[in-house]
Amino acid sequence: MLSGPVGRIVNRLTKLSNIFISQKWRILGQWLPEESKISSPDRYYEQGELPLNEGPQILKHGKDVFVVYSCGQSWLDTYKLSYLRLKDPDADLLDPKSWIKSDKPVFEGTDQVFGVGHASFTTSPDDREHYIYYHTKKERKPGWKRDIRLQKFTF
């Protein structure tokens, strides 16, 4: 760890670049009593100027539990989404070995859609259709001018 003002900033960014499960989370009907790091930016698609795993969201489908998160750099057109999947519904949520990380991004931009990130999920009133809402960049150049989008998806 670094010290001094620069060190405090770098150390804080390092902590933010990991995904933690903490007591703030209620998953599968139980409050989690402690904090545990379950992901760090260790895949090729998470790398760059400042490797990040951020904005985690829980997505449940049947017995499957996912943590969908943003990765890469939020100010670049290469920002994307990936996920962790719980190996077993009875697995220890605080154990990083209970999660399987995707080998590739699950959702990323195209030639016309840039910097996909920070997703949330909802369903239709009858729970038959699933939707993802997320932001994208308005242009390729670095920055945070964004649009909000809603898109139907299937499992």
Image (cartoon, rainbow, N blue to C red):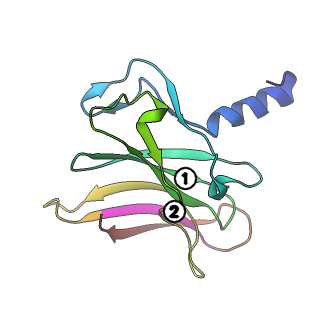
Magenta residues, dominant SS class = strand
- Residue 135 located within the stretch drawn in magenta: yes
154 lies left or right of 51 = left
* Amino acid beneath label 1: Ser
| Residue 44 in the image, given as x and y percentages of width and height | 66, 56
Res. 70 mark: 1
Q: Position of residue 109 (x, y in %)?
A: 56, 72
Q: CA distance from mark 2 to mark 1?
A: 11 Å
Secondary element at image label 2: strand
Query: Disc 2 marks which amino acid?
Result: His
Q: Which residues are magenta?
A: 131-138
Q: Does residue 46 belong to the magenta stretch?
A: no
Q: State the quadrant of the N terminus.
A: top right
| Residue most extreme to the left | 126
Which quarter of the figure is the C terminus placed in? bottom left
Q: Which residue is mark 2?
A: 135
